[in-house]
Image: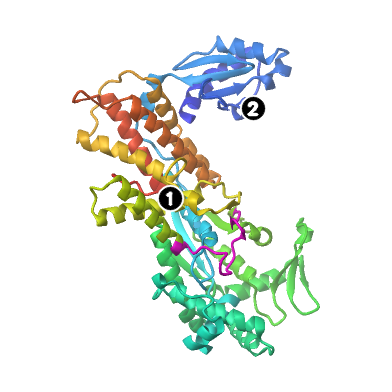
Amino acid sequence: MNILRELIEEPLMSALTDMGVSGDFWRKALGPSREKAQGDLSLPCFPFAKQLGKSPVDIATALESSISGNFEVSSTGGYLNFKANPEWLASNVLKENEMPGQKSVLIEHTSANPNGPFHVGRARNAILGDTLVRLNRLFGNQVRAEYYVDDMGKQVGVLAWALANLSSENVDNILNDAEEVNPKWIGKKDHETVRWYQAAQHLRSNAEDKKIEEEIGRLVHASEHGDDEVLAQFEDAYQPVLDGMLETLSRLGIEFDTFTKESKFVVDGTVSNLMEKLASLEIHGVADNGAHFLDLGQRGLKGKTDFFYRRGDGSSLYATRDIAYHMWKWQQSENLVNILGEDHKLQAKQVGMTLQELGQKVPEVMFYAFIKLPEGKMSTRRGNVVFMDDLLEEAQAQAASVVRGLRSDLSDEEVEAIAEAVGVSAVRFNITKVSPDKGFTFRWEEALSFEGESAPFMMYSHTRACSIAKRVGRDAKMDSKGEIPPAMHELLRVMACYVDKLSHSVNENKPHVFALYLLELATAYNSFYRDCHVIKDGEVDEFNFAVSEKARALLREGMNGIGVIPLESM
């Protein structure tokens, strides 16, 4: 609770100085109390014991009697505890929040190969990335959401070859109906076109001669040398698939500001110039096959120390183009954040060290662990993948069933609209609330839960606040504070941490921190709603209404920040 920290640090510094403590090392130790009943902030006094020659208990007791202000001070077991005065807290919480963010940030996320529909595993990148974009904007930062289009890799080459050489009948015969398109998605190009990719992969794995592989290799080689005709062929192949993928993401509320093609840096000569610079570095080497590399072991890299950036035929590798892309991104923004799967840690380290070698800054990276299905890690094999489109349809259907059971007064159109918002929000929150570095097993019943630690629970709390606002029918007109019972006090304490939790999430790239905080806020509001009535005997309690309206505003803003749709009625 930083508003309380700002209040107590000066008198605390004065008391510690009078006691004989030198320095301000204690500031880092002052933090949230482990037990809310004891206070909002606590200071462990154990670090002072040696310097002062006293026990932590005696130090805490002495400090308790020498500090005063708009807060309560108590000592327990060597800890000094601070709890904000409820009236002071209310005055500060009900003020307009000032967001401190001022940075420009370019966040690159998703960047999935455009060769098939999104499955739930790939969508974790998009959901986490978009949530980080939203939270940065809520924090006040200037944000650009970027999609790096892989328009020249092997996977796009396979797709382009398949579309040029296989008919629909060929694909049906090769797959033998093993990968039928869900009738729901007929006409959606990502679902339809992936069959060509799957058929080509089947042929590649079973072909006795190498003709197909040679043809695909020729296409990829030409693309990596900036061949305009081949790059146009690749774009014709992947663009309809990418459009279908973006349609799915749009349903999740995920949009991008800019799209940058990987080929841009080959065509404009940036990659060629970069490879010349890399060849001039003292850690440069050439392998027996003519490939060029940097020996990053000389810079402290452990494990795979040779970072290859140029093939023997003179063409660049993906990582080389990635370095060129990052050098370009640093010209676009003063802060870069990348969202990557944990399997990219080595490459991200290699790219970062190479950027440093070139005198460039290293971007921040939020790595995320993989989602598993109960029977194993997510893959593209049939039976072991959940397409995001299918999940969203199921979520919407489940939500519609629940809404119809609760609201028989709603029309089918109203039910469908509410169900879509609830379903999308439930899926997003199920992924966002888990720490990015933790993998988890995806289960339908958890993703679509409408109780407990879920998006629908949060959404329902917001609709309660909206219902009160609608009944009152005007803005709050509080001119004095009233009684602050325990449920209101707890809600005020939670609301006071809104900017703190948002700052933590943004500055440490941890979207789950703010997501879980919003659950805490919704829970506190529900207790307030139960115990602190806004309308009593037909009269509006202006103080209670002001607190309710503040909670409603924070819930609405916060839910938008994590991609949960703040409905006004459910």
* Distance from Cα at disc 1 to Cα at disc 2: 43 Å
Reading the image, the residue beneath label 2 is 25
Instruction: Sort mark 1 into few (<14), some (14-19) or many (20+) by Cα contacts within 10 Å.
Output: many
Residue 455, quarter of the rendered image: top left
Farthest residue toward the right?
A: 288
Q: Residue at x 34, y 28 (%)?
A: 530
Instruction: Sort mark 2 into few (<14), some (14-19) or many (20+) by Cα contacts within 10 Å.
Output: few
In the picture, the disc for residue 426 is 1
Q: Is residue 44 visible?
A: yes
Residue 17, quarter of the rendered image: top right
Q: Residue at x 40, y 36 (%)?
A: 522
Is 543 situated above or below 270?
A: above
In the picture, the disc for residue 100 is none
Residue interval drawn in magenta = 368-390
Callout 1, which amino acid?
Ala
Q: How many marks overall?
A: 2
Q: Is residue 378 magenta?
A: yes
Residue 100 locus on image (x, y percent): 44, 40
Callout 2, which amino acid?
Phe
